């Protein structure tokens, strides 16, 4: 499925790599991994990276940026996202051709884009690495480290259900290519005392529905009160509700001042919930997904749907 992409990479002199906005380790890992590898294998080409920044993950790499002019006769490759509204920097529309490499279950709404999607992949980064290894493109240490970061973060350190033998096979190859695993773990998982204590505070804010769906609703006032950014609260705090016996679905609703809307981050253990995220205009993975809510009233409707799903799970009438 990648052969055509390789031909396009060979054909174009300028390649601009995009990924989703508010990037996580996999968005940045796949973007920078592909960037470093293409630069290494095709030194004569202009390879560029664009998008917004995640201040916590700057160690993965520095964006080159791109001018509008660069898009003329360029190939745009979008990593880790297929939905137009979630792509960071919409100038991919100026590119001559657009390829999408993704591992989410969403189909694309980007007209004319060629999609290479495999939702069985634990990360977009391992999909990119698979592509590079399949065509014997060399993965240097920088590329390997960026890609490995994507694998580690999207698989939850190789523990989420999407982790499979292929994930570990690619991880093994990346270590062989020089990925600096220990330094990645130190950068990702050593935190300040303040951050640890804030997580404890948020753990205590958690509420439960009748059938033990855990949730938090974080208003703008809450963000100010705890002096926490939207991103650190939305993505950063959903995890405090994970790994708790009897709680198989958890949801974090945080007000996003930029959008003027609540964003829900949804997670589960052993239960598919992405259909509920999609019902409310969102998407993602079976057991890790999210949605931007058109109205705050939807919070209760979503919680009711999750609660019903939890009830079915407890009754044994839901199987996944
Ligand atoms: Mn991903």
Image (cartoon, rainbow, N blue to C red):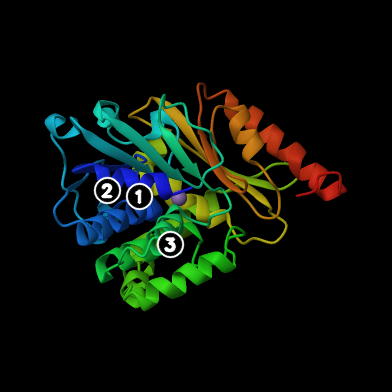
Q: Is residue 163 visible?
A: yes
Judging by the rendered image, the residue that carries numbered circle 3 is: 134
Residue found at x 81% / y 44%? 318
243 vs 31, nearest the viewer = 31
Which numbered disc flags the more N-terminal residue, 3 or 1? 1
How many residues crowd around disc 1 within 10 Å: few (fewer than 14), some, or many (20 or more)?
some
Tag count in the figure? Answer: 3
How many residues crowd around disc 2 within 10 Å: few (fewer than 14), some, or many (20 or more)?
few
Which numbered disc flags the more N-terminal residue, 3 or 2? 2
24 vs 48, nearest the viewer = 48
Q: Which numbered disc covers residue 10?
A: 2
Quarter-wise, where is residue 39 in the image? bottom left
Give the spatial CA distance, label 3 vs label 2: 15 Å
Q: Are marks 3 and 2 in contact (CB under 8 Å)?
A: no
279 vs 246, nearest the viewer = 279
Q: Provide the secondary structure element on which disc 1 rests.
A: helix
Q: Are marks 2 and 1 in contact (CB under 8 Å)?
A: yes
Q: Provide the secondary structure element on which disc 2 rests.
A: helix
In x, y percent, where is residue 91? Answer: 25, 29
Residue found at x 57% / y 63%? 163
Q: Please say if 284 is above or below 180.
A: above
101 vs 240, nearest the viewer = 101
Quarter-wise, where is residue 196 in the image? bottom left
Q: Is residue 285 left or right of residue 202?
A: right
Q: Please say if 57 is above or below 18.
A: below
Judging by the rendered image, the residue that carries numbered circle 1 is: 6
In x, y percent, where is residue 289? Answer: 55, 43
How many residues crowd around disc 3 within 10 Å: few (fewer than 14), some, or many (20 or more)?
few
In x, y percent, where is residue 274? Answer: 62, 40
Q: Is residue 111 left or right of residue 11?
A: right
């Amino acid at each position: 499925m990648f052969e055509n992409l390789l031909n396009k990479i060979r054909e174009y002199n300028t390649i601009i790599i995009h990924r989703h906005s508010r990037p996580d380790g996999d968005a940045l890992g796949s973007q920078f991994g592909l960037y470093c590898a293409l630069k290494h294998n095709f030194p004569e080409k202009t390879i560029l990276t664009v998008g917004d920044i995640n201040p916590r993950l700057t160690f993965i790499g520095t964006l080159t940026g791109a001018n509008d002019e660069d898009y003329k006769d360029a190939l745009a490759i979008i990593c880790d996202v297929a939905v137009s509204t979630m792509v960071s920097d919409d100038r991919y529309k100026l590119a001559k051709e657009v390829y999408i490499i993704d591992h989410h279950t969403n189909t694309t709404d980007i007209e004319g884009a060629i999609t290479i999607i495999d939702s069985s992949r634990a990360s977009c980064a391992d999909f990119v690495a698979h592509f590079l290894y399949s065509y014997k493109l060399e993965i240097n240490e920088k590329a390997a480290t960026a890609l490995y970061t994507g694998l580690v973060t999207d698989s939850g350190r190789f523990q989420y259900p999407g982790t499979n033998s292929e994930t570990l096979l690619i991880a093994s190859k990346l270590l062989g290519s020089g990925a600096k695993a220990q330094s990645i773990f130190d950068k990702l998982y050593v935190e300040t005392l303040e951050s640890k204590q804030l997580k404890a505070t948020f753990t205590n804010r958690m509420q439960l529905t009748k059938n033990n769906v855990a949730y938090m609703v974080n208003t703008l006032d809450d963000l100010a009160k705890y002096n926490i950014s939207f991103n650190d609260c939305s993505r950063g705090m959903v995890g405090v509700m994970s790994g708790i016996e009897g709680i198989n679905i958890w949801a974090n609703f945080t007000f996003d001042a930029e959008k003027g809307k609540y964003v829900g981050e949804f997670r589960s253990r052993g239960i598919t919930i992405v259909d509920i995220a999609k019902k409310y205009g969102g998407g993602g993975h079976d057991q890790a997904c999210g949605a931007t809510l058109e109205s705050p009233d939807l919070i209760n409707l979503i919680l009711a749907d999750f609660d019903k799903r939890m009830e079915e799970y407890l009754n044994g009438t839901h199987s996944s």
